[in-house]
Image (cartoon, grey):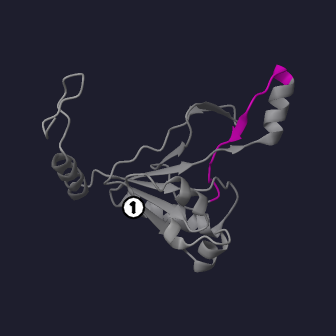
Amino acid sequence: MGNNAETQEGVKKPTQNEIIDGSINKLRDNTFKVYFYCPPMNGPSGGIGVLLRAAQNLSDNGFDVTLVYEPRHDQRASYEASTKAKKQVDIFDRFNPKWIDFDISKIKILPLGDKEISFNDGTTQKCIPLSVNPEDFLIIPEGFPDVMKKTTQVSCKRIVFAQSWFYVLNAMQPGEKWQHF
């Protein structure tokens, strides 16, 4: 099989040059995505506020921005629902930063995962797996080397949004180096 290889379905598989050209065109045409990993803190936080403001600024300037987060398990609501249903029920806290003083309603906020989950506000939502392309960007706040570890093999560019070097170093384990990420 050469550059014109076909898959079993008979569809032509793109060559490496076609994939690269497609990514370059998406960058040039502003049709790439910017994902912000956001800790699901529903209480006021200056650092989260700065992160959300950056996402809003990019969105306001025409970029396709999505906030992604790992849903936080609501222990109390899960216990109450499990007791009522007489079986294990998992309830999660929806990320809803209503404490900010600017509008992010145009930005998608999506939980990461692989199933539909129930929230403590009575709603359900299908979680999404993080699916990125080479031309996309993933913005990660400085205190999350675990997210850097989990995303070492993703095809997009990862950018650490460091508001303070202290949090970058403080979150790493003894013996870890920034170069590991």
Quarter of the figure that contains the N terminus: top left
The residue wearing badge 1 is: 58
Closer to us: 91 or 179:
179
- What residue is shown at x 62% (from left), y 48% (from top)? 95
Which range of residues does the magenta coloring cover?
84-99
Which residue in the rendered view is the most extreme toward the right?
A: 83
Query: Which residue is located at x 63 percent, y 32 percent?
Result: 117
Q: Residue at x 21, y 58 (%)?
A: 28
Q: Give 103 or 55, whichever is nearer the viewer.
A: 55
69 shown above or below 141: above
Q: Position of residue 123 (x, y in %)?
A: 64, 32
Q: Where in the figure is residue 43, as x and y percent of width and height? A: 70, 58
In the image, what residue type sits under mark 1? Answer: Leu
Q: Nearer the viewer, residue 58 or 1?
A: 1
Q: Secondary structure at mark 1?
A: helix
Specify whether residue 28 is painted magenta. Answer: no
Figure check: 120 above or below 145: above
